[in-house]
Amino acid sequence: MNNDFCIISNNCWGAEIYIERQIEYNSPFVGLFIPPLQFVKMANNLPEYLRQELVFKQETQFKEYEELYLKEKYPLALLGDIEIHFLHYKDEKEALSKWKRRLKRMPEDASNWFVKACDREINEWPKFITLWNSIRYKKVFFSAKKRTGINYLISITESYDNYVTDGKSLYLLSKDYFDVDNWIDSKGSSWRVKNISYKRSLQFLFTKLKYKIKKP
C-alpha cells in the first residue's frame, strides 16, 4: 500500500482517503476549498505557489462565496494570488499551523502527487478545461455529465443536479465509479473505471425523479 502520497484537492474529497487509511495528512489541502479557476491555475504552478506564505484577509473577492464566508466566519487567506477558504478551521492560528505542518509532510517526489477536481461551481468552462488539461500531475476529474474535451474525466451518473455532490459525500460515491485505491497504490499507472449495475441505475432514476418533483 502506498501511504506516501499527497492529494491536491479543490475541496474536502482529499481528506477522506487519509481518514479511511488511518494515516497522517500528507497534504495541506485538507478541510478547505479553492475556487475552480484559481485551483487549476495553482495546480499548474504548484511548487512555485507552495513556496509562498499564506496572507490572511477579511473579505473574499468572489461574490458567490460572500454569504457562506459571512455566515461561517472561517479563516480566509491568499497563497500568492490564490484565495483559500479554510472552511473547517476555527481561526487563522489553527489554519496556519496545520497548513505548515502538513506542507512539510508532502512527499518530495512529484510522482506521488495526485490532483482531484470536480464540476461544482464552474462557470468558465473553456478556460477551466484548458488549464485542467495542462496540469502535469496525475489527476482525476469527477463530473455529473459526460463533458467533452476534459482529460481524465469520471462521469458520476448518480448526481441529482448538473454537478456532483459535496466533497465528503463524493468520495464515497466516486469509489463506486473509479478505483481510487489502485490509482494511488500504483502511483497513477492503474486507471480502472467501474460500472454501476443497471438495477442500481434504474433505482436512482426513480429516486432522482422524486427529488426533482419535491425540489422547489
Image: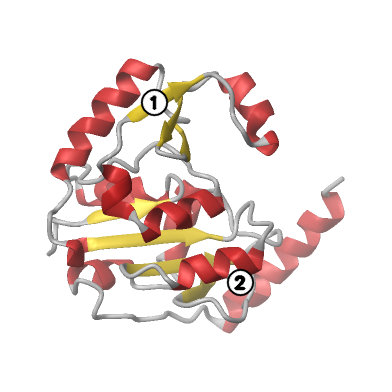
Is disc 1 surrounded by few (<14), some (14 to 19) or many (20+) residues within 10 Å? Answer: some
Q: For this view, does 156 lie left or right of residue 215?
A: left
Q: Is residue 75 visible?
A: no
In what quadrant of the picture does the N terminus appear?
bottom left
**Disc number lying in front (1 or 2):** 1
Q: Secondary structure at mark 1?
A: strand
Residue 172: x and y, percent? 43, 57
User: Which residue carries the number 2 mark?
Assistant: 157
Q: Is residue 85 visible?
A: yes
Residue at 26%, 67% in the rendered image: 181
**Mark drawn on residue 55:** 1
In the foreground, 30 or 99:
99
Residue at 35%, 40% in the rendered image: 30
Residue at 28%, 44% in the rendered image: 50
In the foreground, 204 or 73:
73
Can you say whether 6 is above or below 202 in the image?
A: above
Residue at 40%, 38% in the rendered image: 80
Q: Number of labelled discs?
A: 2
Image quadrant of residue 164?
Answer: bottom right
In what quadrant of the picture does the C terminus appear?
top right
Q: Amino acid at mark 1?
A: Val
Residue 190: x and y, percent? 26, 80
N-term-proximal mark, 1 vs 2: 1
Q: Secondary structure at mark 2?
A: loop
Q: Amino acid at mark 2?
A: Thr
Mark 1 to mark 2: distance in Å?
39 Å
Can you say whether 98 is above or below 215 in the image?
A: above
In the foreground, 90 or 60:
60
Residue 99: x and y, percent? 28, 32
